[in-house]
Amino acid sequence: MQTKRIKSFVTGFPRIGEKRELKKALEEFWDKKTEVSSLEAIASQLRKRHWNYQKEAGIDFISCNDFSYYDQMLDMCEILNAIPKRFAEISDPLERYFAMARGNESSPAMEMTKWMNTNYHYIVPELSAETVFKLNPKKIISEYMEAKSAGIKTKINIIGPLTFLGLAKTTDGSDNFKLLDKIIPLYKELISKVSELDDEVFVQFDEPLAVKDPSQEFLSLMKKTYQEISTACANVRIILVSYFDHASETLTALKDVPLYAIGLDFVYGKENLNCLSDLNGKKLIAGIIDGRNIWKSDYNKNYLLLKEIEKSVPKENIIVSTSCSLLHVPYTLEYEEKLDPRIKEWMSFAKEKLYEVSDTADIFENSDTDSSLLKLKTNGEILKSKIDYLKTTLNAESDKFKDERSFSFAERISAQKKILNLPVLPTTTIGSFPQTAEIRKLRSDFKAKRISQKDYDEGIKDYISSCVKFQEKAGLDVLVHGEPERNDMVEYFGEQMEGFVFTQNGWVQSYGSRCVKPPVIYGNVSRPKPMTVDIISYAQSCTRKIMKGMLTGPVTILNWSFVRNDIERSAVCHQIASAICREVSDLQSAGIKIIQVDEAAFKEGYPLRKEKVKLYENWAVESFKRAVSSAEKETQIHTHMCYSDFNSIIGTLEKMDADVITIETSRSGNKLLNVFAERGYKNEIGPGVYDIHSPRIPSREELVQQIKMLIKVIPAERLWINPDCGLKTRKWEEVKPSLKNMAEAVMEIRKTI
Ligand code: GLN
Ligand code: ZN
């Protein structure tokens, strides 16, 4: 048989387990219900299973060290001995590792933040000029040997030095990249260690930071670093992978560096096509199977793209790959028993994508074989049926509304003030109240049909009316219903709109043992009937105070879902906006005077490259404005965003033009609030006055101080007083005294102004 020329490559595979085995094993171990040996046994089983899946699918480059008990950046801290001082005394390595990830009695956890522009969170390395780096390659070597003894030769995945440093924080204010000279020798030492593992060893350096508008300095450091690394050991092949956007500058900078291969993302970085000649003899890891979405790949398009690439890269140098690690998609469609079979046929999760990688490689190798022709035909038929179905059977909301509200903020706010009649420094909350065990049980009993609609409705109404009573008693001005009917702020709306489906087992790791199950937007979005009007009207009927209607905004719904890829994201967002717009209109007709449209995930959708930001901001703002365009000038529109740093998006916030925005500034004091004052932001603002992420109850005195501080930055006439986010993760014992103190603090201050 002729040997295959076109190889297949997978950047990384998910690790949590297709039934979330690792999640369960970790949580039992943390709860001290199991021994470390059982955690290790499950981890080992999972690794072997995942390697075998890849082997069975015919993947040539399979990773080791893509497994992690918590996070791969944290693993890298361990490998380089970058252990923050407060954990250094813990002698058991695993105990120390989990303490770094989750904190312990004496020390807070290391910080966590989003990995590039994904919803995965990594642990932020804490470095300083004093960090004593030391190589600890145990994990890498043992995983490599584990795979080898299972008959699988792997490539070794590690985070590259530039990305490791660039995404770290320094605790002494020193320049991150100054530490490069200290860690390059360790990477070289690592290479020399792993060179002993086999005759030929492959090491994959993940450098996603290369796609984030690299500076000249970054590029020259990149060149210097990889020059050294690439020549460290003759039998170690260095592969540098980038993903999530194009990395053309890096490709050019590394033109003369003798790397074995470079990985480029052709799904989210089409621009990569323009600079392929700079590969200069290196192999190309061509990322063409989408690692961030769940749709079946188009084999014909893949073939044409590879043909295009072949114009600049010799065929034998092309390796077919996923666009990034498959960490960002769920495991497999195998356990999806309830999905509409037609829609399921359009999808592909991690395990299915493995076959897409090897099929694409086979088709590229020889498109004329019977098996290639059959694959092209079957794939083409499915995708055609999808397009036909989406075209003919679903209609998006036709737009009977305007693009934006007709009156200026000044006109709106004066009309609203007359109707709302609120005191100065109005108090409110962000929407949710504690999600108690009873309320969760009520929802799950109803979902499983263990209780009737009537019992469920009564349970929800009881919760709402007790929330209302509490808020009235505490003396809050604008009330909320508490969101007891919502499991999740996106899922709740997705379930009531056309164009969405929900998986049973489509879990994706968010951080550590935590997973999320994003909704899937497969078709045109529309809203067949009102979604929140009954519940909000009921809540309003419980009180003479003003009840806020509570909706999730179009951009957040989009950013927290898997989105169809046959039309632009902006078009999908506009459809959702039109649906929300109808809901705003219906709430308004039902007499609701204030409507909050949450945009908690607005910032998440920002592209990594500056040149693409404007486009996103334009359609995201347009969508928000469209969503609230049905509001009359008397109806007050609030929005809420879970951020505190608005420095880079203040202009965008202005364009959104919500009457009131509530934000999350409590932990950063009023420093970050200054941007609103400096900019001359005119609309009303509710900067969170206390941190809901902690169980601490803020005292009345401290809240008085906090509010006084705020008044110095934002005039009292434009200031709202509220906690910094929803209260669903808190307990009633914390919420009740905190809100009471907040309301009392405001009453005290009102006497003085
Ligand atoms: N209204 C939502 C709540 O209060 C907002 C949640 C959020 O900002 N993430 O829970
Ligand atoms: Zn929030």
Image: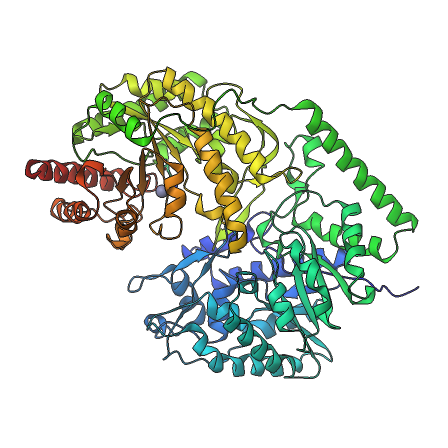
Q: Quadrant of residue 552?
A: top left
* Image position, residue 495 (x, y; %): 52, 28
> Which residue is at 67% across, 59% downward?
272
> Which residue is at 29% across, 26% downward?
411
> Which residue is at 40% across, 28% downward?
485
Q: Which one is in front, 149 or 158?
A: 158
* Image position, residue 500 (x, y; %): 58, 31
Q: Residue furthest left?
A: 752
* Image position, residue 545 (x, y; %): 22, 22
Q: Which one is in front, 282 or 448?
A: 282
- Side (left or right) of 277 relative to 172: right
Question: In the rendered image, is residue 15 in sight?
Answer: yes
* Image position, residue 397 (x, y; %): 56, 23
Q: Give the vertical position of 343 relative to 135 (above or below).
A: above
Q: Which one is in front, 45 or 225?
A: 225
> Which quadrant contains ligand 2?
top left
Q: Which one is in front, 267 or 692?
A: 267
- Side (left or right) of 95 relative to 56: left
> Which residue is at 73% across, 78% downward?
200
Q: Give the vertical position of 466 relative to 362 (above or below).
A: above
- Side (left or right) of 322 relative to 222: right
Question: In the rendered image, is residue 556 in sight?
Answer: no
Q: Quadrant of the C terminus?
A: top left
Q: Give the vertical position of 547 relative to 228 (above or below).
A: above
